Amino acid sequence: MNNIKLTQLLNIKYPIIQAPMFLVSNTAMVNEAMKGGIAGCIPALNYRTLDELRVAIKELKAAKIEGGSFGFNLIVNKSNIKYKGQLKVIYEEGCDFIITSLGSPETTIKHAHKVGIKVFCDVVDLKFAQKVESLGADAIIAVNNLAGGHRGGLSPKDLIKLLVANCNIPIISAGGVGCKADIDDMLGYGVAGVSVGSPFIASTEANVTQEYKQACVDYGADDIVMTERISGTPCTVINTPYVQKIGTKQTWIETVLNKNKKLKKWVKMVRFSIGMKATKNAATKATYKTVWVAGPSIEHTTEILSTKDIVAKFVN
């Protein structure tokens, strides 16, 4: 099984998934990705209501062409109170694949497989890779230490080789892909394909401000830092003057409260709420509070292009 390529799994021309990005991904991006011969994925949380999610699925199904696939990302732990409703809408309407994050994919796999939807699972280490394989996952998304947002702790090469040697389902590498040479490297390590996110932030179709897109052009890999000020879990952002001003560590109050087992959960929920609001404002409206999530692969982003042209840079 682990020799099956992503092109076979999803019936696409090139072994690339346009990664799901909170606030950024949308149907216009995925439509163009499919036209370019790759797969596209959108976080279900990008839609405020289940009706909006249902409309998006119908739009993508109507636009789907031969050689293109689309899917949705689900946060499958208790922090996502919309999870059950989102899963229900997705298996009722249908799509090609689901990517699960931050929790057990067992329920998702059970329901998705009933209607022929493939399930790929985010993991950062061998333990969880083997766990999701035992639950019936169709492929593993190996999130390495070059990924944007919440990333893993191992280098792409180390994580890929570890999983390829010990797992029997396809491995898809996530993180550290900014140009075609990076894709060639990942495929050389033995993966079935790659998941690419940050380079698509600077696309004309992305639902973010021109300032956010231009930041991905103006800044590079050395400008990416880890912050605890968004979700409470370390997350990669562009090191703007505002990020430098507020710092990247928890406040001393949060540090103290996080040591209390009873309060830790609630402190993290409050931090997540505050951080997500700040991130949304920075991505979608003019503000000096620039907290822009991105990964080091923006190093190769030199201009704002259409999704179609970005895909062409990766495959030509």
Image (cartoon, rainbow, N blue to C red):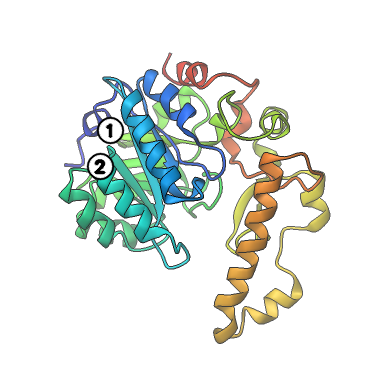
- Which residue does the image show at 26% across and 28% down from the upper left? 7
| Whether residue 259 is situated above or below residue 11 in the rendered picture | below
Disc 1 residue crowd, few under 14, some 14–19, many 20+, Cα 10 Å: many
Horizontal and vertical percent position of residue 300: 60, 26
Whether residue 10 sits left or right of residue 76 in the image: it is left
Tell me which amino acid carries mark 2.
Pro
| The C terminus, quarter of image | top left
Three-letter residue code for mark 1? Leu
User: Element at badge 1?
Assistant: helix
Observer-nearest residue: 71 or 85?
A: 85
Residue placed under numbered mark 1 in the picture: 6
Q: Residue at x 56, y 48 (%)?
A: 149
Position of 147 relative to 277 (above/below): above
**Residue beneath the point at 26% across and 47% down:** 92
Query: Given the current orientation, which residue lies at the most extreme front position?
Result: 51
In this rendering, is residue 250 above or below 41?
A: below
**Is disc 2 in contact with disc 1, using a CB cutoff of under 8 Å?**
yes
First in residue order: circle 2 vs circle 1: 1
Most distant residue in the top direction = 316
Q: Distance between the Cα atoms at labels 2 and 1?
A: 8 Å
Residue 24: give x, y in percent of width and height: 56, 38
Q: Which of the 4 image quadrants contains residue 2?
A: top left
Mark 2 neighbour density, 10 Å: few (under 14) some (14–19) many (20 or more): many
- The residue identified by callout 2 is 170
* Front residue of this view, candidates 304 and 72: 72
**The one of 111 and 185 positioned closer to us in this rendering:** 111
User: Of 3 and 155, which appears nearest the observer?
Assistant: 3
Disc ID at residue 136: none
